[in-house]
Image (tube, grey):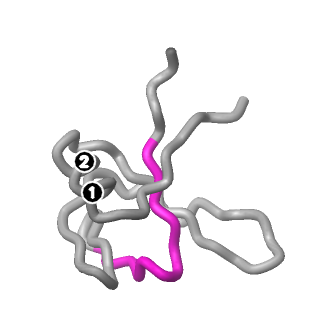
């Protein structure tokens, strides 16, 4: 079963996820390979133009994709 999710790209997306205290999934992007979930990190703690901090870990925005699950309708 596939889950529906939203990729958090912009600062507005991150701000919305932070306000909602949404659990954020960290997905590692590997060339030529399927995407790998690197961490089920939890709520957003902090972000900068280069990094996102989740559960005390800093992830480089250019190396990972950040997703939230959307509720089923």
The structure residue drawn at horizontal position 37% and vertical position 58%, both measured from the top left corner, is 41
- Residue 29 coordinates in the image, percent (x, y): 63, 73
Q: CA distance from mark 2 to mark 1?
A: 6 Å
Dot 2 falls on a residue whose secondary structure is helix
Label 2 Cα neighbours within 10 Å, binned few <14 / some 14-19 / many ≥20: few
Magenta-highlighted residues? 57-68
- Residue 17 coordinates in the image, percent (x, y): 28, 48
The structure residue drawn at horizontal position 42% and vertical position 63%, both measured from the top left corner, is 9
Q: Which residue is mark 1?
A: 12
Label 1 Cα neighbours within 10 Å, binned few <14 / some 14-19 / many ≥20: few
- Residue 32 coordinates in the image, percent (x, y): 83, 76
Image position of 23 (left or right of 63): left
Magenta-colored stretch includes residue 58: yes
Q: Which tag is nearer the camera, tag 2 or tag 1? A: 1
Residue 30 shows which numbered tag? Answer: none
- CB within 8 Å, label 2 to label 1: yes
- In the rendered image, the vertical position of residue 13 relative to residue 35, given as above or below: above
Image position of 20 (left or right of 51): left
Residue 16 shows which numbered tag? Answer: 2
Magenta-colored stretch includes residue 3: no
Res 37 → quadrant: bottom right
Image position of 73 (left or right of 46): right
Would you say the magenta stretch is mainly helix, strand or loop?
strand
The structure residue drawn at horizontal position 32% and vertical position 80%, both measured from the top left corner, is 51
Which residue extends farthest right?
A: 32
Which residue extends farthest top?
A: 73
- Residue 30 coordinates in the image, percent (x, y): 70, 77
Q: Nearer the viewer, residue 38 or 19?
A: 19
Dot 1 falls on a residue whose secondary structure is helix
Quadrant placement of the N terminus: top right
């Amino acid at each position: 079963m596939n889950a529906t999710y939203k990729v958090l790209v912009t600062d507005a997306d991150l701000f919305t996820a932070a306000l909602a205290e949404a659990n954020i999934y960290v997905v590692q992007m590997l060339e030529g390979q399927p995407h790998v979930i690197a961490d089920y990190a939890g709520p957003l703690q902090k972000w900068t133009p280069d990094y996102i901090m989740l559960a005390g870990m800093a992830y480089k925005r250019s190396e990972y994709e950040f997703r939230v699950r959307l509720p089923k309708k």
